[in-house]
Image (cartoon, rainbow, N blue to C red):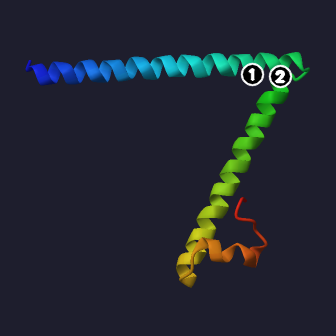
Amino acid sequence: PSPSSSQGNGASEAALRCEIEELKRKDLALDQEIAQLLSEGYSLEELEKHISLLHEYNEIKDAGQMLLGKLAVIRGVTTKQLYPEYDLELSD
């Protein structure tokens, strides 16, 4: 192998190690957050239900955004211009 290809492999290996370490830190932070919520009296079932509802909300919101986008294309306007018509806030 040429020196440049071995250096490239080393760089990608280093990047993967960094990514693994970052994922480990995130995993630890999530474990700590779960422990904190459990200590505050939340149950795992309650947390799982909440997460499930958040996923459902995001799917519905994504579908709404897609429909607004298609309507905007049909009308030849931006989705931002449609928000007032449907009493939506830009943060929605």
Q: Is residue 40 above or below residue 82?
A: above
**Tag 2 secondary structure:** helix
Q: Residue at x 68, y 22 (%)?
A: 30
Looking at the rendering, which quadrant does residue 25 occupy? top right
User: Relative to the observer, which residue lies in front, 88 or 8?
Assistant: 8
Q: Are marks 1 and 2 in contact (CB under 8 Å)?
A: yes
Quick check: 37 left or right of 69? right
In the picture as drawn, the residue positioned furthest to the bottom comes out as 75
Quick check: 48 left or right of 7? right
Mark 2 crowdedness (10 Å alpha carbons): few <14, some 14-19, many ≥20: some
Q: Amino acid at mark 2?
A: Leu
In the picture as drawn, the residue positioned furthest to the right comes out as 41
**Cα gap from disc 1 to disc 2, whole angstroms:** 6 Å
Residue placed under numbered mark 2 in the picture: 37
Q: Is residue 58 above or below residue 26?
A: below
**Tag 1 secondary structure:** helix
Residue placed under numbered mark 1 in the picture: 33
